[in-house]
Amino acid sequence: MDPDAVKSTLSNLAFGNVIAAAARDLQKEMVAKDKAQATQASPDEVDLDELLDDPELEKLHAERIASLKREVEKREVLKRQGHGEYREITEGDFLGEVTGSEKVICHFYHREFYRCKIMDKHLKTLAPIYVGTKFVKLDAENAPFFVAKLAIKTLPCVILFKKGIAADRLIGFQDLGSKDDFSTRALENILKMKGIIDEKKKDDEEEDERKERKVRRPHRLLAPAAASCPGSGGSCCEQASSPLPPTTASVVALHTAAS
């Protein structure tokens, strides 16, 4: 065999081996590079299986469930105590109602007074939203004892009780601009400022705005012809068409006189 031919063949085989080895090295380098890029490109990717087995996450989840359960149980207890609705009570019920809950809003009203009906409408809207506070109303004409004891002279009169103590009150519409067309939100904000209702969560606000727009649809409650305030054009608290008993007659006063 020709020595030169043998030498050429060996040389070709060596070169082929070098090329093959280089190709293998290049392939390994590209695979490693791809893996490194994948790791760098998704540092925020989360392994769900690892999360599900995370003891800290499980603890937070359990605490959240327990908190929601306590909240539901608390609401149920409050509802059994008369919270979550706007209710009529009697003079005989009064002490038990205002001392039986930490926060109570009691509206002393007269059934024929136009402004009392306006206040009723707004309180009825707020009662199911703020379950932590009890909302009740009491006919002042049928509660002469407490009208006298609480020195109520103007209707509507909304008294705010905290732990059984009359802590504050809204007399007529003095805190509401002395206007009949105030919004439920305006009354709500005043009650928040006075600490008788709690701050709501932000995710409830949009729903409340829809309810408020519904409440404020244009309409007027017509007062009896004989129920206008003398000399005020009917814009103040109306007097009843029939005389009040002497013990409660003192509660019928003009808003303008109290302003």
Image: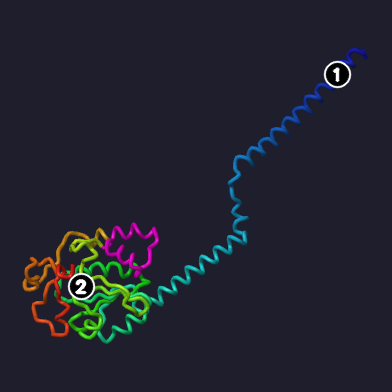
Circle 1 residues within 10 Å: few <14, some 14–19, many ≥20: few
The segment highlighted magenta reads 184-211
Does 15 appear in magenta? no
The disc, 2 or 1, on the residue closer to the chain's N-terminal end is 1
Q: Are marks 2 and 1 in contact (CB under 8 Å)?
A: no
Q: What percent of the width, then of the height, locates residue 98?
A: 32, 80
In the picture provided, is 158 more to the left or to the right than 235? Answer: right
Identify the image's colour scheme: rainbow, by chain, secondary structure or one colour: rainbow
Residue beneath disc 1: 11
Where is the N terminus found, in terms of image quarters?
top right
**Residue position for label 2:** 156
Q: In this rendering, is residue 209 above or below 167? A: above
Q: Examine the image and state in which quarter residue 207 appears.
A: bottom left
Tell me the amino acid under the disc marked 2: Pro
From the viewer's perspective, is the residue at label 2 or at label 1 nearer? 2
Quadrant of the frame with the C terminus: bottom left
